[in-house]
Amino acid sequence: MTLGLRSLVLVCALLVHPLSRADAVADWNKIALDTVVQSGQPLEDKLRAMAMVHVAMFEALNFIQGRYTPHFIVEPPRLSGMSIEAVAAAAAHHVLVDLYPEQGAALAAALRTSLDGSPGPRATTTDVTTGANIAALICAVRASERGAEGDLTDRRTPSSTGRPIATASRLEPWVLKSSSQFRPADPISRQDALSTREDKDVNALGVRVRAVRPDVQTEMNRFSSLATPLDWNPIVAELISSRGLSPIESARIHALISMVVADAYAVGLDAHYPCAPCIAASAAATVLASEFGAGGNASKAVNTDQAMGREIARYALGQYFRPLQQPAGRASH
């Protein structure tokens, strides 16, 4: 698909899927997904882009609300009187324009729509600048993955057809110390990766059916048939929407899942694992179970991909975006 055609497709997608005008996190999740799907990039780059967008939105919202421990920026100052919707939209917009400058016009139009539809007082220049500045920090953190000309460096191995094949991740992990952090000591066989789950009380991702709320279990079951790790995104968005979470809570869950999915998929590539998307699905399901349902009641993983994905997710849940301890007598915003 040519660059011009991709831009046209993105504009059409934004018109077909109008913004909700009340939820910047949900709106810009859709915009980001449409943008990366049309980019023609390798899957790991698309996962990286989604993680950057959601981490930027979360860190920007947390910067003005100060509810969680930040990871990529300094301790948030708890700014008051700012438009949450505008800050989140500006953060996501900055990341997407940085990654896909050819889509600048369509993204600028989407930002104007977001700002015009923000509830409450009209968005100010300070709101937009704050979101963009936080996003710029996230872009700077990931800048080492770019080559001299600004493009992502491509370290994939050429195949016999001349096309590169993803044999190892070329991107830095988000939550892990390295892509080999949870790699099994013994080689992973294809038989182990594709072996049948025999426990009838355990779904395709190794989470006990009886231990999870029915609505969460239904969504988690859908992970077992997903074509790529990007397909988790609409499912997570549905779960978040059904619970009426606040913008910062929505941004936090999106950011956590985006990071663990990107890292889990990279782990699979690095380990030459037969089913890297399986590891990513297990990691995403573990985060959902912890945030929405099963918590610590999930059963022992019954397959290597489940075990690897679960370890990655548990590590992330224990390390990132934990609630801040509120001083006595001080309410959170």
Image: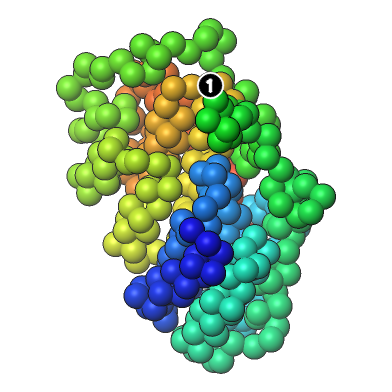
- The residue positioned farthest toward the front in the image shown: 161
- The residue positioned farthest toward the right in the image shown: 148
Residue at 29 percent across and 35 percent down: it is 224
- The residue positioned farthest toward the bottom in the image shown: 122
Q: Position of residue 328 (x, y in %)?
A: 61, 61
Q: Which residue is mark 1?
A: 272
- Horizontally, residue 35 falls left or right of residue 87, namely left
- The three-letter code of the residue at mark 1 reads His
Residue at 36 percent across and 11 percent down: it is 191
Q: Residues within 10 Å of mark 1 (few under 14, many from 20)?
A: some
- Horizontally, residue 99 falls left or right of residue 113, namely right
Toward the viewer: 152 or 282? 152
Q: Quadrant of the C terminus?
A: bottom right
Toward the viewer: 72 or 29? 29
In this view, 137 is above or below 144:
below
**Can residue 216 be seen at all in this image of the molecule?**
yes
**Can residue 59 be seen at all in this image of the molecule?**
no
